[in-house]
Amino acid sequence: RQTTDTAFANMSTAKERALAGASRTEEVRNAVEEMDHSSVRVGKAIESIAESLREQTAASTDIAQRVEMIAQGIDHTHAASAESSRRSGALVELSHALKEGVRRFRV
């Protein structure tokens, strides 16, 4: 009788351990699935960040090109302004020369 009771107790203990092991296996499976889902979300976030960086790079390049165009326009405007100033000075000198020439002629 004691052998039967011991065998039954051992079987009950083995059953409890098997159920506990199955429960832990389910917990591990759930944890692995959650890690898998998390890694997919992280991968999507990384893709989104990379796309944002590509867009920012393109925008930065466009801004740099536009700033360069503005700088070239400023250089051109400065050169044109300097030329206008030079010509204005020449006109002033010509005006003085004409005044002097007209002053010499008396009618």
Image: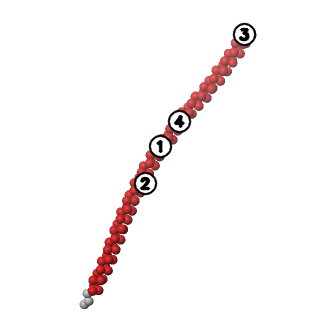
34 on left or right of 16: left
Q: In the rendered structure, which amino acid carries the disc numbered 2?
A: Ile
User: Judging from the image, what secondary structure is the residue with disc 1 in?
Assistant: helix
**Residue of label 3:** 3
Task: Give the color scheme: rainbow, by chain, secondary structure or one colour.
Answer: secondary structure
Q: Nearer the viewer, mark 2 or mark 1?
A: 2
Query: Between disc 2 and disc 4, whose residue precedes?
Result: 4
Dot 1 alpha-carbon crowd within 10 angstroms: few under 14, some 14 to 19, many 20 or more: few
**Residue of label 1:** 50
Which x, y percent locates residue 36? 54, 33
Which x, y percent locates residue 41? 52, 38
Residue extending farthest to the bottom is 107
Q: Nearer the viewer, mark 2 or mark 4?
A: 2
Query: Between disc 3 and disc 2, whose residue precedes?
Result: 3
What's the CA distance linking mark 1 and mark 3? 69 Å
Which image quadrant for residue 85?
bottom left
Q: Are marks 2 and 4 in contact (CB under 8 Å)?
A: no
Q: Which mark is residue 63?
A: 2
**Residue of label 4:** 39
| Viewer-nearest residue: 24 or 50 | 50
| Viewer-nearest residue: 25 or 46 | 46
Dot 3 alpha-carbon crowd within 10 angstroms: few under 14, some 14 to 19, many 20 or more: few
Relative height, residue 36 to residue 106 (above, below): above
54 on left or right of 102: right
User: Judging from the image, what secondary structure is the residue with disc 2 in?
Assistant: helix
54 on left or right of 22: left
Q: In the rendered structure, which amino acid carries the disc numbered 1?
A: Ala
User: Judging from the image, what secondary structure is the residue with disc 4 in?
Assistant: helix
Q: In the rendered structure, which amino acid carries the disc numbered 3?
A: Thr
Image quarter of the C terminus: bottom left
